[in-house]
Amino acid sequence: MRYVSLISLISLIMATGCARPPAGPAFLTIESARYREAFDAAMAASRANDMSPSLRDRRLGIIDTDPSIAGSIIEPWRNGNDSMAQAWENTLVLQRRRARFEFTPASFREPQGTAVPDLLGVAGSPLDLTTYQGAVELRVSVVVERSFTPGIRRDTWSSRNTTRTVVRRPASSPETPTTQFWTPVARDTAFERRLLAEVASTLGAE
């Protein structure tokens, strides 16, 4: 009976993990009259995916989010994975995602053949998207970060023999040594498109 329950659980996890949500657009084009609405929709989409906005700048059109731990194979309620391979990867190693929403004028082009002026010498005021007139594009970048512990010496025969270098500090030191670090390893383009699809759905529902 125990094996039957285990097989049923694995089948349920695979059925939920293999289902891919429909892909969204690579970017959105929004009229300036709906910029504030789109900005709010982007923040709502980030919160709905457990990534609370940590930086919000309506004038520059930037939203940075807090990281969110990526779901593993035993967490089918986390719907952020695009495939079973992603779920297995997040099971083998601890990973998280963070997102950045960027609104820019659709007509924006990088200057060609001109030197970029020093920031201290810029005479014009920065762009204010809250008063901008014209089409605006929204793009999202989602970065996958992987956890690692410095000083790990993994044994090739048994994980029980794995050791870690510990830097000893004086007893008077108030600092606690950091034992976990995060490093970017990839971009999750499927997650980016899903976030944009959620924003588009919110704007289209009006």
Image (cartoon, rainbow, N blue to C red):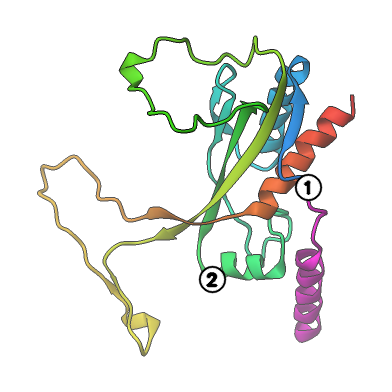
- Gap between marks 2 and 1, in whole Å? 28 Å
Find the magenta span and give its range: 1-23
Q: Quadrant of the N terminus?
A: bottom right
Majority secondary structure of magenta residues: helix
* Looking at the image, residue 165 lies above or below residue 188: below
Closest to the observer: 189 or 3? 189
Total residue callouts: 2
Amino acid type indicated by mark 2: Leu
Q: Residue at left 79%, top 61%? A: 20
Q: Residue at left 30%, top 62%? A: 150
Tell me the residue that label 1 is attached to: 24
* Looking at the image, residue 132 lies above or below residue 16: above
Circle 2: element type: helix
Task: Find residue 94 and report its horizontal and vertical position in percent.
Answer: 50, 61
Q: Residues within 10 Å of mark 1 (few under 14, many from 20)?
A: some
Q: Quadrant of residue 175?
A: top left
* Looking at the image, residue 131 lies above or below residue 162: above
Q: Is residue 93 left or right of residue 18?
A: left
Task: Find residue 77 and report its horizontal and vertical position in percent.
Answer: 73, 55
Closest to the observer: 116 or 126? 116
- Residue extending furthest toward the bottom: 157
